[in-house]
Image (cartoon, rainbow, N blue to C red):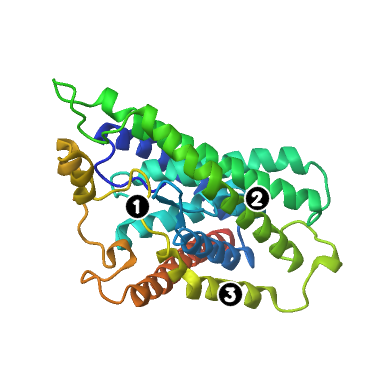
Amino acid sequence: MHVPDGYLSPETCAVGLAIAIPAIAVASRQVMRQVKGRAVPKLAMLSAFSFLIMMFNLPIPDGTTAHAVGSALIAIVMGPAAAVIATAVALLFQALIFGDGGVLAYGVNVVNMAIIMPLVATVVNRWIAGRSEPGSVRRVAAAAVAGYTSILAASVAVGVELGIQPALFHTADGTALYNPYGLAATLPAMLFAHLLIAGPAEAIITSAGYSFLARTGQLDEAAPASHKLRSNPGLVSLGVLAVLALLTPLGLIAQGTAFGEWGPEELVDQLGAIPAGLAQWSSVWTHSILPDYGFTSGEAPLAAYWISALIGSLIVAGFTYGALWLANRRQSVGASA
């Protein structure tokens, strides 16, 4: 799902940024108006949750991998604008620090996972949930369907973005400059992985996450008292994030690379050569501290994955919390002046 640099033309990446930047700006203004008080740490934790969930790679029968995203859950419990910001922050630091997703392709990845997924999830959830009670079985089922359909929509978008590259950007003799596989390969591959594996995972995560937040009284809606746990909901949520961070090395069990995320060496094995444009742009960002969530030497992969999970979740949560706290502080000072 994370499109690396080099697989998309600079023109495609520019279109992605042209969509992502205004969307993030609009969402930021809405979040600054809506997310205040206790909602600030909740959004920070959900942003870290999205970051951690994307580290759990799932094996696909064709030898590739896929993962859930978590943005559907954020959209359902805090609104699509909050999901745009939380997921965009997670994607930003994944690209900059861990080399997961391209820096040039950041806008496209935001469109797919931080815009399409929350919007689809919001529409589907509202349609199915209707006026049912918060925390009800119907709401939980609606969350599951919303998570499933949202990641399918994102996978179709990725398949189209990758698949149109050979037709639009090629040499005079028809050799692809960027992603070498057309729509006949990219769409079935993306749909196969997400219909069978990543989609159900997203459905489970979204419905279980919604049920958990309802039971701990952390929904903006008023949940029935019988659905609330007596323990401190904030500490319970931190505990869940800590457990997720500890379990992230399970993401190393899945062997193979996600479709369309191969490194240059893997493409050489597949094709015998690297497309010229892909070779030119694939190494545009070389400053990742923990590339692929591991040490450069390749030693101690479990420790590296744990360290990456800890560093990444703290940075993502801290950045989200700090930015919202600062924005709310400035609004308070401006209102009192």
> Can the viewer see residue 263 in this picture?
yes
Which residue does the numbered mark 3 point to in the structure image?
238
Looking at the rendered structure, the kind of residue marked 1 is Thr
Q: In which quarter of the image is residue 74?
A: bottom right
Dot 1, crowdedness within 10 Å: few (<14), some or many (≥20)? some
Q: Earlier in the sequence, mark 3 or mark 1?
A: 3
**Residue 298, image x and y in percent?**
24, 70
Circles 3 and 1, Cβ within 8 Å, touching? The answer is no
Residue at 48% across, 44% down? 193
Which numbered marker is on residue 76?
Answer: 2
Residue at mark 2 to residue at mark 1: CA–CA distance: 30 Å
Q: Which residue is nearer to you in this view: 81 or 296?
A: 296
Looking at the rendered structure, the kind of residue marked 3 is Leu
**Residue 21, image x and y in percent?**
40, 42
Residue at mark 3 to residue at mark 2: CA–CA distance: 20 Å
Dot 2, crowdedness within 10 Å: few (<14), some or many (≥20)? many
Q: Which of marks 3 and 1 is in front?
A: 1
In the image, taking residue 138 as reference, residue 175 lies left or right, namely left
* SS for dot 2: helix
Residue at 34% across, 27% down? 164
Residue at 51% across, 53% down? 68
Which residue does the numbered mark 1 point to in the structure image?
257
